[in-house]
Image: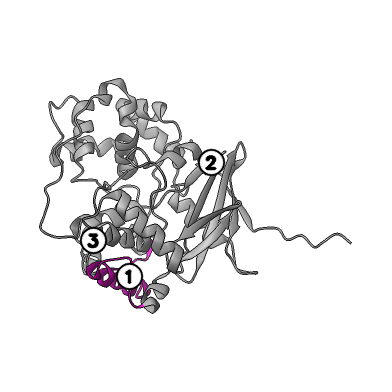
Amino acid sequence: MLPHMTTSPSFTLVPRGPFSLVEAGAFGKAAEPAGDWPGGGTLESGVLRLAFCRDDLAGHAGVALRQDADGVHGTVSGLDPGEPVDPVRDQVARMLSLDGDGEAFAEVGTRDPLVGRIQAAAPGLRPVLFASPYEAAAWCVIAQRWGRAQALRARERLSRELGEVLDVAGAPVAALPTPGRILEAGRLPWLPELKQERLRAVARAATEGLFDAVAIREGDPAEVRARLRTVNGIGEFAAGLIHLRASGVQDALVHGEPRLAALVGAGYGLGGPATAEELDRIAEPWRPFRTWTAVLIRAGGRRLPELAAAPEGAPLPRRRTPSRPEPLALIS
């Protein structure tokens, strides 16, 4: 007899409008060092591999993604027999902004010629998000006052030793520990004591439901960010990152991002970086995709010759608080 063959759970997402898995795999990797970044995955031979804490915070999932003319196909690992695939599918859709209407987003480019040109230069580029607000908050704490490379190494070690290493299309990919695992672990010897304390605070807040993606996405932005700032170690910058980079929000205004201000200033002939008031005015035609458009400009704007030489923008002022992650930007 032939051996019994098991089939891995799978799903298909059909994008509405342009979407590129290649762009998703490259998103956020322009900065050095090259390689993985929290919220993205590794794209090799047309396969994007992801491993993350599930939204229910009870376990992990690994997903291998491929794209063809019929859609984006995901093969799931890490689920127990009988566990539903739909929540993982929906989480991946949010992570890759496949839960939004790309056809309607393309209409922004017809209202704003500069946006249209960037869309043409970066076809199918959409925001790639952290796997969840919990993972974004954990990254903010790990990255406080550390360079990106050091923070990535610490996150990888934490994931391998306390999280779960999943087989994703034949490759081992480590997922961040669940909040419960962090709270059970006691001391986290790979992090300074202050980071340990703050990571435990993030884990406790996660178990209390503070990082629910739907509540963050649909709530009033000022109120949402104020609630996030009640968590020890989450300051103003981190609260903005969690809101914009993990919840799936599509139309929140983006302020305080110097590179975006510089690109908007160059693209719209302002003679310098856009002020908050100028950005508010210019962003009106971007509704209901002001967040998506800000990400597009920042991540793809330099593909236009006139924006390639735009100044980087003055760095945000440093504060005497370790609540701001360095050097990851708010939106890309």
Query: Residue under circle 2?
Result: 44
Query: How far across and down, in percent of the image, does residue 74 sit?
Result: 58, 50
In the rendered structure, find residue 225 and report the number of the disc placed on it.
3
Q: Residues within 10 Å of mark 1 (few under 14, many from 20)?
A: few
Q: Is residue 266 left or right of residue 46?
A: left
Q: Is residue 36 left or right of residue 69?
A: left
Residue at the outermost top position:
305
Query: How far across and down, in percent of the image, does residue 103 sit?
Result: 46, 37
In the rendered structure, find residue 189 and report the number of the disc placed on it.
1
Q: Residue at x 30, y 34 (%)?
A: 297
Q: Secondary structure at mark 2?
A: strand
Q: In the displayed structure, would residue 241 be above or below residue 210?
A: above
In the rendered structure, find residue 38 and report the number of the disc placed on it.
none
Residue at the outermost right position:
1
Measure the alpha-carbon separation of dots 2 and 1: 33 Å
Which one is earlier in the sequence, the residue at label 1 or at label 3? 1
Measure the alpha-carbon separation of dots 1 and 3: 30 Å
Q: Which residues are magenta?
A: 186-213
Identify residue type, mark 3. Arg
Identify residue type, mark 2. Glu
Measure the alpha-carbon separation of dots 2 and 3: 36 Å
Is 187 colored magenta in this rendering? yes
